[in-house]
Amino acid sequence: MLDPREFIRTKRDGRAHDARDLEAFIAAYHRREIPDYLVSAWLMAAFLNGLDEAETAALTGALLHSGRTFDWTGLGRPSADKHSTGGVGDKISLVLAPLVAACGVLVPMVSGRGLGHTGGTLDKLESIPGFRTFLEPDAMRAQLDRIGVVMVGQGPDLAPADGLIYALRDVTATVERDYFIVPSIVSKKVAEGAGALVYDVKCGSGAFMKTRADAVRLAQRLNAVTRSLGRKAAARVTDMSQPLGAAVGNALEVEESVAVLKGGGPADVRALTLELGALMLSLAGAAPAAEAPRRVQEALDSGAAWERFLELVRAQGGDPAALERAGGMPAAPVVAPVTAERAGVLEAVDSFALGELVVAIGGGRRAKEDEVDPRVGLMVRRRIGDRVAAGDRLADLHLAKDDAGAVGRARACFRVGDGPAAAPELIIERVD
Ligand code: URA
């Protein structure tokens, strides 16, 4: 029988865990034989002292084996999924999943809720009236077979120990370490049964990884651990020095995704979706690498991806009409402009602080049990490198009530200076 105090002491003193002890600790927590406070103490010790490659692999295995693993090979089509390491305004999954399904690849997407300052796909989907993010395994299989895509939460079956630890990390300041992020992501993604996994590793002020070197290392570790578990993997390190697209906040991001699916929307959201979609198609073996970009472009331009998204919403209990009707989606009662105090060039955006602000106005959680307000968020009106005049709108805040403090906090996230400032590259590095 493992003594949790001895286990915590090992990591506190900077020693490596035996793989069997790590597995036993996670299994005991999953059975709720160890309370949250002991696991929190271990998480902080490991956050500070690190886990080596063998421990990271053992943690991945322990999380993966806490639940079942799906297998979709019987459906007779290739399958693929994408996972982002988390950003601000990152709504790519909402467009990408139906797009790739429309190209004939199964997308059994299992997503999370907001983590720290970042938004989560599940919270975004739940802002669509009626949308259900939990499906029983049989219903998942039937829907995948019929329309080629499901978008669900982890549920009690899939890497459930990760679900418990993810929620604990979110509220104990123990998120930003690659040896926690890799097991968390890879265990869920391997358990969901996709044959090919594409990772979008965010890098910059709004990401957990702030530097290119850290992001590339995370990408390499995600690829390596995924391949060691028998799946194909490739990664893109992409910019998160400013929010992706304009919308940040649950319902606002759904509306922006709909705009992209209907042929418009921000150029960066379109470009990244097409890049990741083409990679999913080629990695899954559904199209040669040279042909995949054309296939995804056609599926977006022809409206096939939009049609598939409507089918998905309908299949999971959502109201597709709410997406097209004015006022169909939840909307905030107050929209407050955030203006520039001086003329100049937008040099930098503190995307982390913007994400935290959206949490603070109700768009995310501070405690595990908090409710999320789907209406609130912001629309960013200027990109890094843009010239602005004094009084120009940098963003619009969508609020549940008047809040001058929130407007001031938002303004402080935009640094306007004398410039020059170059627009950041969207795709920073391809890690295949
Ligand atoms: N996404 C996850 O699923 N887990 C993490 O730890 C970070 C991002």
Image (cartoon, helix red, strand yellow):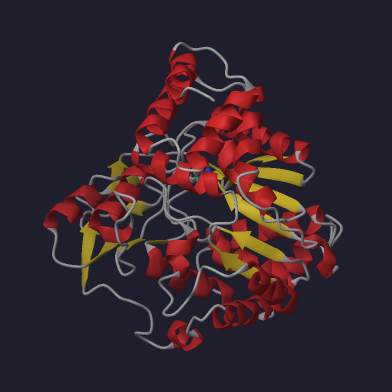
Residue 311 visible, this orientation: yes
Percent across and percent down for residue 210 are 47, 33
Residue 424 visible, this orientation: no
Percent across and percent down for residue 286 are 84, 62
Residue 10, compared with residue 239, is above or below; it is above
Percent across and percent down for residue 231 are 77, 46
Residue at position x 59%, y 81% from top?
315
Seen as rendered, the residue at the extreme front is 1
- Taking 43 as reference, is 378 left or right? left
- Residue 113 occupies which quadrant of the picture? bottom left
Q: Quadrant of the C terminus?
A: top right
- Residue 228 occupies which quadrant of the picture? top right
Residue 282, compared with residue 317, is above or below; it is above
Q: Quadrant of the N terminus?
A: top right
Residue at position x 76%, y 71% from top?
103
Residue at position x 47%, y 41% from top?
165
Residue 370, compared with residue 125, is above or below; it is above
Q: Nearer the viewer, residue 54 or 300?
A: 54
- Taking 254 as reference, is 77 left or right? right
Q: Nearer the viewer, residue 144 or 292?
A: 144
Residue at position x 64%, y 54% from top?
82
Percent across and percent down for residue 41 are 38, 27
